[in-house]
């Protein structure tokens, strides 16, 4: 994938109202990561809260099938253990790498079920992370990385469920949440 296509929005890539699937982190982890994102992400580009993306672009017309699959699957799962291991330089930003083997297995299961619908980006190897800075110069990203490395200590987190979003060209619209071990919540 070229750098220019990587930065295309789903709408620019020719897909109308695609779906995005994220993992829901426990409140302490979410609050910490959101504070870093607010401090370091360019404010004019920061339209969504800190998130751990599982799939970047699922077809919008698969909504019912995806909802049914997640409804049936997520209530059978207990919250998953995770650990924020460290920071990673991404060229034009910084992310926090999350070690969560059970989440990686769940994501692989979902990818196998939805293989026909996956974009090239979503077919790539999944490395759980939360982006706290993006679309800045490499020099600025390096400064952010150095500053955060001075205060970063690995911390435990829990993945408490999944959230499905619809991309409409700006802030994401939350469609539903699928708490692990509980009934889904329709956000419409």
Image (spheres, rainbow, N blue to C red):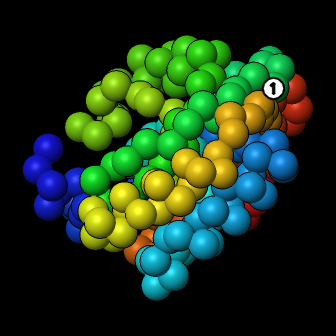
At x 76%, y 46%, the residue is 29
Whole-percent x, y for residue 163 in the image: 66, 47
Whole-percent x, y for residue 102 in the image: 64, 16
Whole-percent x, y for residue 180 in the image: 80, 29
Residue 23 seen by the camera: yes
Q: Is mark 1 on a helix, strand or loop?
A: loop
Outermost residue, front side:
150
Left/right placement of residue 182 relative to residue 41 reads right
Compare residues 7 and 130 and report the one nearer the observer: 130
Where is 73 relative to 154, above or below? above
Residue 71 seen by the camera: no
At x 51%, y 43%, the residue is 87
Compare residues 147 and 66 and report the one nearer the observer: 147
Q: Residues within 10 Å of mark 1 (few under 14, many from 20)?
A: many
At x 41%, y 74%, the residue is 169
Outermost residue, bottom side:
44
Tag 1 residue:
79
Whole-percent x, y for residue 137 in the image: 28, 69
In the rendered view of the protein, which quadrant contains the C terminus? bottom right
In the rendered view of the protein, which quadrant contains the N terminus? top left
Outermost residue, right side:
182
Where is 124 relative to 20, above or below? above
């Amino acid at each position: 994938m070229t750098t220019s296509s990587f930065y295309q929005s789903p709408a620019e890539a020719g897909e109308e109202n695609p779906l995005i699937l994220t993992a829901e982190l426990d409140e302490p982890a979410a609050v910490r990561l959101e504070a870093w994102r607010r401090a370091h992400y360019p404010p004019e580009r920061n339209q969504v809260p800190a998130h751990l993306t599982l799939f970047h672009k699922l077809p919008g017309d698969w909504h019912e099938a995806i909802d049914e699959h997640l409804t049936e699957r997520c209530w059978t799962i207990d919250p998953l253990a995770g650990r924020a291991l460290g920071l990673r330089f991404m060229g034009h930003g910084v992310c926090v790498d999350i070690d969560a083997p059970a989440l990686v297995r769940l994501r692989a299961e979902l990818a196998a079920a939805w293989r026909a619908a996956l974009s090239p980006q979503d077919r790539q190897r999944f490395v759980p992370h939360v982006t706290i800075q993006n679309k800045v110069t490499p020099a600025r990203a390096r400064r952010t990385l150095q500053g955060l490395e001075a205060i970063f200590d690995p911390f435990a987190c829990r993945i408490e469920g999944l959230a499905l979003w619809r991309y409409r060209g700006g802030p994401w619209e939350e469609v539903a949440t699928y708490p692990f071990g509980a009934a889904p919540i329709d956000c419409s």
